[in-house]
Amino acid sequence: MENESIKELEWKEPIIIPDGKHTGEIVKIVYRDEPYEYTDIVIKIDGIDIELKYGCPTILSEGSKLGRLMQMFGVEAKSGTKINPETALVNKKVEFMTLMKKNKDGREYAEVVADSIKPVKIS
């Protein structure tokens, strides 16, 4: 009996995302709770077959990272109200900045610059 969960994976060249301004679309929201409660905003970059995550502590207040992002997309910061981040953000076209950084092993990765995600202005 064959194990159907085994996959073959293909080696690929690392994708280098140049520092600077990019556009894309928010494709999903992922929630995680290890080691802390975080909300990851997943962005598909235009013209590159890659998705980047922008992590925010799962705290919704006027001054929080997630709160500032939600306000950027027109969500009113009103104490006591509830908002679904997926409804507010998914499928929205965005512009943002990235910087290449090195992890502790010396490998490079692209990081979305904090507070750089903005809705694309349609003219």
Image (cartoon, rainbow, N blue to C red):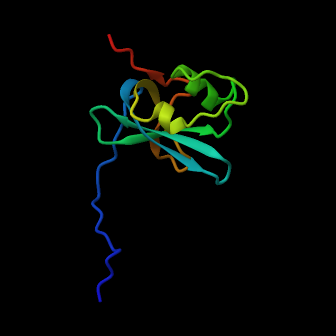
Q: Quarter holding the N terminus?
A: bottom left
Residue positioned most to the front: 81
How many numbered discs sit on the rendered protein? 0
Residue positioned most to the right: 79
Q: Quarter holding the C terminus?
A: top left
Q: Quadrant of residue 61?
A: top right
> x and y percent of residue 9 in the render?
30, 63
Residue beneath the point at 29% across and 42% down: 49
**Apparent side of residue 101 relative to residue 65 in the rendered image (left or right):** left
Residue beneath the point at 39% across and 41% down: 51
Residue beneath the point at 49% across and 25% down: 117
37 in relation to 59, above or below: below
Residue beneath the point at 49% across and 38% down: 86
Can residue 21 be seen by looking at this rendering? yes
Q: Quadrant of residue 22?
A: top left
> x and y percent of residue 54 in the render?
52, 37
Residue positioned most to the bottom: 1
Depth check: give the residue in front, 60 or 115: 60
**Apparent side of residue 83 relative to residue 50 in the rendered image (left or right):** right
Depth check: give the residue in front, 18 or 48: 48
57 in relation to 13, above or below: above
> x and y percent of residue 109 in the render?
45, 41
Can residue 100 be seen by looking at this rendering? no
> x and y percent of residue 60 in the render?
67, 33
